[in-house]
Image (cartoon, coloured by chain):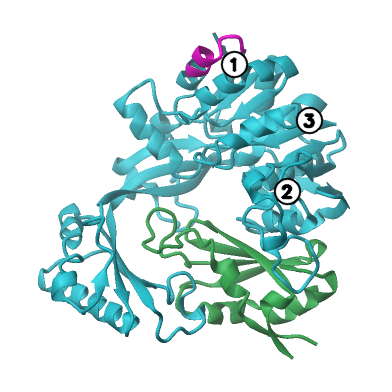
Amino acid sequence: MIRIANGQGFWGDWLEAPVRLVEQGPIDFLVLDYLAEVTMSILQKQKQEDPNLGYARDFPPLIGRLAGKLKERGIKVVANAGGVNPVACAQAVLKAAPGLKVAVVLGDDVFDRLDEFLGKGYEMRDMETNEPITGIRDRILSANAYIGAFPLAEALDTGADVVIAGRSTDTALTLAPMVHKYKWKPDDWDKLAAGTIAGHIIECGAQCSGGNCQSAGGGFGISDWQDIPAMADVGYPIIEAEPDGSFTVTKHAGTGGRVHSDTVKEQLLYELGDPKRYLTPDCTADFTSIHIEDVGPDRVRLSGIRGGPKPPTLKLSISYTDGWKAIGTLVYSWPQALQKAVAADRIVRMRLDHLGLTFDDIYTEFFGVNACHGSAAPPNPDPPEVQLRIGVRGQDRKAVDRFTRELIPLVLNGPPGATGFGEGKPPVREIVAYWSTLVPRDEIKTRVEVIS
Amino acid sequence: MKVPLSKIAHTRSGDKGDTCNIGVIAYLPERYPILLREVTPERVKEYFEDLVCGEVERFELPNLGAINLLLHGALGGGGTVSLRVDAQGKTFGAALLGMEIEID
């Protein structure tokens, strides 16, 4: 059995989590997921400004902090911290932790190959809208192929203490140590599917061990989230993986949170599409084959998982600029807080109209009334206060800039009782949008390099 | 008898682009058929009528006593494009708990 722990569900997750995983009990592999869909574009911009940047900057100091214990206990780290510059990331890690062996996985970055792909006749239409990529070609900031577990396992095979990838899938980080340790073959579909599902369960950190969980598993008919203990000390998840593909989800003894079949089921369903066809670069996993059972306190066992062949294509994650947006707020107080906020919204829209400004979208929400749930929210006819939140987006930055000047004047020239303007006019932000598409998998050649 | 969905199920929601997914899990396996009967794509679309522009799809996971709902065009463009506070659909699952269903 090997123990694989996830200490980071996204870049910005709890800084203490990976340290606690190493210090509070036994693990063999520490995996850290840093990349969300838009993270790559942020990193690309940083690299354009400084060729030595473009990776998750939290990562090298973390490894520096942990280096002694990693070495002493033989814990290996697998992370997609490399972003668009895995080699620079590796060099920074070596600077922070000179005694460690560091390997990188390269080949996911296809930013410079898009015209080559277009020349080969790949239209690279967006998987959601089916639009051809030519419409956004000149606005692309980054383009990376999602890569699977095998290149990461190959990097572990070099004996590296730390493996750094760019745009690997989140699930590959967890599957790779199993492929490495158990020598699973590229067509061991059931085992690869099991390791992929293990990765899906822990890729969001504490979201399977008590965080964001409605059920503590205490019974039925009630959301007993308040019974999940000691969330200030929540334990991040650990997979105890067996050579046959079965595994147990758990956490270190004495930590807070809860691992129960209810909390694990919530995470299994998280960001899921067709449960029979969960596609990754490594296999197709079937979530309807999972057998799940509670086998002890904070121990959930999964077995019986089936998988099928990997798809003939790989997904590209592409980011591009798509105009500007700004979102502003004002607070209105009782009495008639909602009526005042509705009137203020109408005034703003009329003034924008009189200025001749047009936008791709204007959207208004009333916090305290319907912002999260729309018309599904329970009625609240006379709330003590309401926050008006108006957002605009468009391709013309000047129009968006002008909008940001239209909210604060309402304090003096609109409905009575407005406050909450202390932060001044809202900032204008460039929109970096996300485009996903497919290319034949043979186009993507990965390689492993040990950095010294 | 009419009760809110929260009496028999818990939920989690998230995003994939402009699509919101809601996992709905029966607390007890014997209540799973009630989910299938009551939480239909048509009813979910109607429940979120002002938020969901596209279709609602449903997938079944009898092994988990759960269904997975995909609400297309539900997030105002999704991700960084959306102007909504809940651009990632994090609260849709909680909202669905208030839907009235008929139990035996």
Q: Are marks 3 and 2 in contact (CB under 8 Å)?
A: no
Does the magenta run of residues contain A339? no
Foreground label between 2 and 1: 1
- A94 in the magenta segment: yes
* Residue sitting at x 62%, y 37%: A17
Residue A149 in view, yes or no: no
Q: Which residue is mark 2?
A: A285
Give the amino acid at mark 3.
Lys
Q: Secondary structure at mark 2?
A: strand
In the picture, which quadrant includes the N terminus of chain A? top right
What's drawn in magenta, residue-wise?
A92-100
* Nearer-N-terminus badge (3/2): 3
Q: CA distance from mark 3 to mark 2?
A: 16 Å
- Residue in the image at 70% along x and 54% along y: A268
N-term-proximal mark, 1 vs 3: 1
Chain letter for the residue marked with disc 1 in the picture: A
Instruction: Compare residues A32 and A187 and report the one nearer the observer.
Output: A32
Distance CA(mark 2)–CA(mark 1): 31 Å
Q: In screen coordinates, is B18 left or right of A308?
A: left
| Quadrant including the C terminus of chain A | top right
Disc 1 element: strand
Q: Which chain is cyan?
A: A
